Image (cartoon, rainbow, N blue to C red):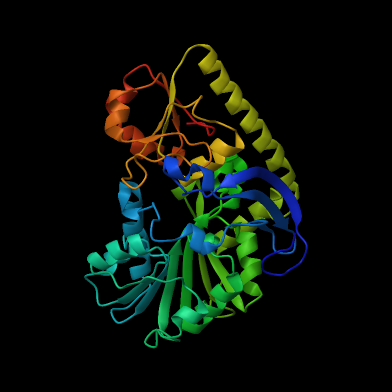
């Protein structure tokens, strides 16, 4: 396989086998025509870049029925309020801001009462429509060079371009950076957050790997990628979102000094082999051990006559269920709050997705928490259930 950016050969890391679309929750009548692909990963030593070897087409993943809404999480709302304050501190009242992958407008809503001119790009129509209803200037289209050419008032005049858990979704990073170059003014910044490779390796959170996450970045890989296009990584700020993320700040080369914090992070990655293939070899073994331990745990619970359900039908759960071969003989159901998922079945393994009302009336002996990265928010909401003698568990230590 070859790197999507340099076209150089990459080393294979691990195959998670046959996989459906992570957000492809479906009705029973659609089981036979369900789409599958091979979820395999590789590593570019030249760019220190962890990536998928292959993936579905973007239009298959991001469409009129995209079932993820940023505003559904109180934690993410709070996070974006803090994120927007940081951005506002870098802008003036007449500045221009572009968000890539603006979803339902939760982030841009924080700029509604300011004089900052903002626009968001969101390819999934259903979530873009929600943003528009909330008076957010949302373009229902992919962020690409072709699609920004008509944004005359932003070309070479944009002060900040931002994104959150979006850049890893974009296969063609060359087109992305070309687009950024066209939009940013000479002192402009590109600021974005992404799941962090170091956290994934440390926690063995292999559920970060699914069709939408084409890349899992490190500071080393971001630095090397943007250097190819005369941009410079000047800072990296660790975040706790998505189970461990990093906020990257990019400027045009030689425009600004790099931070001491970035130097420490790059040193950490070198010391811990995050910038080379050695860590990938260990990660492969860790994934296999995690899968075996999880299957053994569920097997013992079932042998002891225990009932099990899942909590939160996340995109991440698709990787867990299909890689570990967990089906509806092991989990009775998965409870979720998203109306677009309730009444449907999980991708690949076809476990029923039920409402929270059903969950509370039909509690099981054990609960698999798929949304482990939202543990604090969920446990706060489920205080009454936590008082009961119910075993909560996940493949990540809770």
Label count reads 0
How far across and down, in percent of the image, does residue 13 sit? 72, 48
Above or below 292: residue 232: below
Q: Quadrant of the rendered structure where residue 124 is?
A: bottom left
Furthest-top residue in this view = 304
Q: Quadrant of residue 342?
A: top left
Residue 262 image-quadrant placement? bottom right
123 and 258: which is toward the camera:
123
Quadrant showing the N terminus: bottom right
- Residue that appears at 59% across and 69% down: 172
User: Left of 225 or right of it: where is 397?
Assistant: left
Q: Position of residue 244 (x, y in %)?
A: 51, 48
Seen from the viewer's position, the closer of residues 268 and 345 is 345
In the image, residue 59 sits, relative to residue 229, either above or below, namely above
Q: Is residue 146 left or right of residue 390?
A: right
Q: Is residue 167 visible?
A: no
Q: Nearer the viewer, residue 256 or 165?
A: 165
Q: Position of residue 275 (x, y in %)?
A: 69, 55
The residue that appears at 39% across and 52% down in the rendered structure is 68
Residue 178 visible at all: yes
């Amino acid at each position: 396989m070859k790197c999507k950016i340099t076209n150089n050969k990459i080393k294979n890391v691990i195959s998670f086998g046959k996989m459906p679309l992570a957000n492809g929750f479906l009705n029973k009548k659609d089981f036979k025509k369900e789409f599958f692909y091979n979820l395999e990963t590789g590593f570019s030593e030249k760019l220190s870049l962890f990536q998928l070897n292959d993936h579905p087409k973007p239009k298959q993943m991001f469409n009129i029925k995209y079932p993820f809404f940023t505003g559904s999480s109180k934690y993410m709302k709070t996070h974006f309020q803090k994120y927007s304050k940081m951005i506002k501190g870098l802008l003036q009242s007449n500045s221009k801001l572009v968000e890539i992958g603006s979803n339902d407008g939760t982030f841009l809503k924080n700029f509604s009462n300011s004089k900052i001119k903002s626009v968001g790009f969101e390819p999934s129509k259903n979530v873009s429509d929600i943003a528009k209803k909330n008076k957010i200037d949302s373009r229902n289209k992919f962020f690409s060079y072709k699609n920004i050419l008509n944004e005359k008032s932003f070309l070479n005049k944009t002060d900040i371009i931002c994104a959150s858990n979006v850049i890893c979704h974009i296969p063609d990073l060359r087109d992305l950076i070309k687009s950024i170059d066209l939009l940013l003014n000479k002192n402009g910044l590109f600021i974005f957050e992404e799941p962090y490779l170091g956290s994934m390796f440390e926690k063995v959170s292999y559920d970060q790997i699914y069709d939408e996450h084409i890349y899992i970045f490190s500071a080393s890989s971001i630095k090397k990628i943007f250097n190819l296009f005369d941009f410079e990584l000047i800072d990296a700020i660790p975040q706790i979102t998505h189970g461990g993320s990093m906020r990257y700040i990019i400027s045009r080369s030689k425009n600004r000094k790099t931070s001491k914090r970035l130097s420490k992070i790059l040193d950490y990655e070198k010391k811990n082999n995050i910038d080379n293939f050695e860590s990938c070899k260990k990660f492969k073994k860790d994934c296999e051990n995690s899968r075996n331990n999880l299957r053994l745990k569920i097997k013992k619970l079932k042998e002891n006559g225990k009932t099990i359900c899942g909590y939160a039908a996340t995109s991440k759960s698709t990787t867990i269920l299909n890689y570990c071969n967990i089906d509806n003989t092991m989990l009775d159901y998965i409870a979720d709050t998203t109306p677009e998922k309730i009444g449907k079945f999980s991708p690949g393994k076809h476990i029923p997705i039920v409402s929270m009302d059903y969950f509370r009336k039909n509690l099981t002996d054990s609960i698999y928490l798929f949304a482990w990265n939202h543990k604090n928010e969920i446990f706060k909401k489920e205080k009454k259930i936590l008082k009961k003698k119910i075993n909560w568990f996940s493949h990540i230590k809770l």
